[in-house]
Image: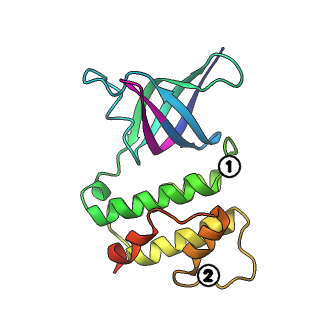
Amino acid sequence: MRHRSVTALILKRKPVGEADMLLTLFTQEEGKMVVKAKGIRKITSRRGASLDLFNLCKVALYEHSSGTMPIVTEVQLLEVYAGMKQELPRVGIAYHICELVEGLLPERQASEDVFHLTKRILTSLSSCSESVAQSVHQFELSLLTSLGYVGSQDLSGSRASLFIEEILERKLKTRHLLPQLLG
């Protein structure tokens, strides 16, 4: 039995059964991981709103034995990024960011640089302070550099997204949204 607490960004949510949810978290301490949140789809759940997409939370986890999926026992909301969630184009860009992080990072491998990079762009999207097109492209380049994928390639313009698709060996689901959102 193991109890621990992690600081996490919620990247993905998937319903399971009647009331449970599988969450893909990107934690500062342990990297990307999938956890189970029991009962959060119930109307009476107090944790449901805190575990919304893109939120930054302090999450208490319980793992019965090694190899089992951790279970969320407690949540403390740290940041909601409300400014971003009020504009549909910025939400679409946040989905793109989460798809990149979820796709490129290996399971349970901490990457504090990428965690802070992701937090920084979500803060930027929420504050509406920078050019969105420039910040998305800069995020893609910084992510690829942090993960060791950048060599001598020319990754200007949309080439970074195409290069990411080559790495993932699949099309990005959110890539077709970007020209509409940025343009």
| Residue at horizontal 25 percent and vertical 24 percent from the top | 43
Prevailing SS of the magenta stretch = strand
Quarter of the image with the C terminus is bottom left
> The residue tagged with tag 1: helix, strand or loop?
loop
| Residue at horizontal 31 percent and vertical 34 percent from the top | 49
Residue nearer the viewer, 105 or 80: 105
Identity of the amino acid at label 2?
Leu
Identity of the amino acid at label 1?
Pro
Q: Is residue 183 left or right of residue 63?
A: left
Quarter of the image with the N terminus is top right
Q: Is residue 43 left or right of residue 162?
A: left
* Mark nearer the N terminus (1 vs 2): 1
Q: Quadrant of residue 79?
A: top left
Q: Residue 30: image x %, image y %?
A: 65, 39
**Up/down of 2 relative to 13, above or below:** above
Residue 106 circle label: 1
In the picture of the structure, the residue carrying the numbered disc 2 is 155
Residue stretch rendered in magenta on the structure: 8-22
Residue nearer the viewer, 81 or 45: 45
Q: Is residue 78 left or right of residue 142?
A: left
Q: Residues within 10 Å of mark 2 (few under 14, many from 20)?
A: some
| Residue at horizontal 35 percent and vertical 46 percent from the top | 80
> The residue tagged with tag 2: helix, strand or loop?
loop
**Up/down of 8 relative to 139, above or below:** above
Report if residue 160 lies within the magenta region: no
Residue nearer the viewer, 5 or 44: 44
**Up/down of 164 relative to 73, above or below:** below
Residue 140 circle label: none
Q: Residue 52: image x %, image y %?
A: 36, 40
